[in-house]
Image: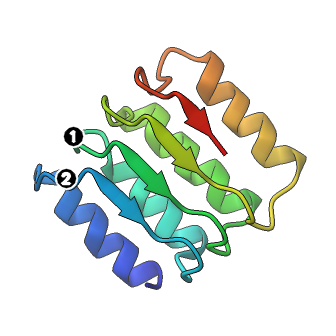
Amino acid sequence: VTCEGARTLGAVLQVGCGVRVLRLRRTRVGDTGAAALGASLSGSSLQELDLGECLVHDAGMRLFVRGLQVHGPPPALALLLLDGNPTGDASAVELVSLLEGPRRPPALERLG
């Protein structure tokens, strides 16, 4: 899956298709794909999202988090995996701002 595929998946998730688990680990989602997913998950029934090892850099993580903050997180999201991406301190700061802010995914139990 590349960034184009992630955009398509995001569009499908927006229409409430009932997908609960999305595992994209070790794909080439990249920064653009992560941004598209972050902006499109608010109305989804997603419970688990695995974006581990997806070539998401600090810029992509920032856009993913901002998408969740602006559009709202998926209400049922309990597991969010972002490990193995080439990110640094800037991404950690973005994730903390999401977790401590008013748009925190309400069901989130595990962040990895």
Question: Residue 63, how many percent across, how many down?
Answer: 57, 52
Q: Vertically, is 34 above or below 91?
A: below
Name the image colouring.
Answer: rainbow
Question: What amino acid is labelled 1 in the image?
Answer: Gly
Q: Identify the residue at horizontal 40%, vertical 58% (top origin).
A: 37
Tell whether 4 sits left or right of 35. left
Q: Quadrant of residue 45?
A: top left
- Label 1 belongs to which residue? 43
The answer to which of marks 1 and 2 sits earlier in the sequence is 2
- Label 2 belongs to which residue? 14
Instruction: Name the quarter where the N terminus is drawn.
Output: bottom left
> Contact, CB < 8 Å: mark 1 with mark 2?
yes
Question: Residue 31, how many percent across, how many down?
Answer: 60, 69
Question: Residue 102, how many percent across, how many down?
Answer: 50, 14
**Camera-nearest residue between 50 and 3:** 50
Question: Residue 11, how many percent across, how many down?
Answer: 22, 64
Q: Identify the residue at horizontal 30%, vertical 46% (top origin).
A: 46
Q: Residues within 10 Å of mark 1 (few under 14, many from 20)?
A: some
Question: What amino acid is labelled 2 in the image?
Answer: Gln
Q: Vertically, is 93 above or below 102?
A: below
- Badge 1 marks a residue whose secondary structure is loop
Q: Residues within 10 Å of mark 2 (few under 14, many from 20)?
A: some
Query: Which mark, by number, is residue 78?
Result: none
Tell whether 43 sits left or right of 53. left
- Badge 2 marks a residue whose secondary structure is helix
Spatial CA distance of label 1 from label 2 is 6 Å
Q: Identify the residue at horizontal 59%, vertical 79% (top origin).
A: 26
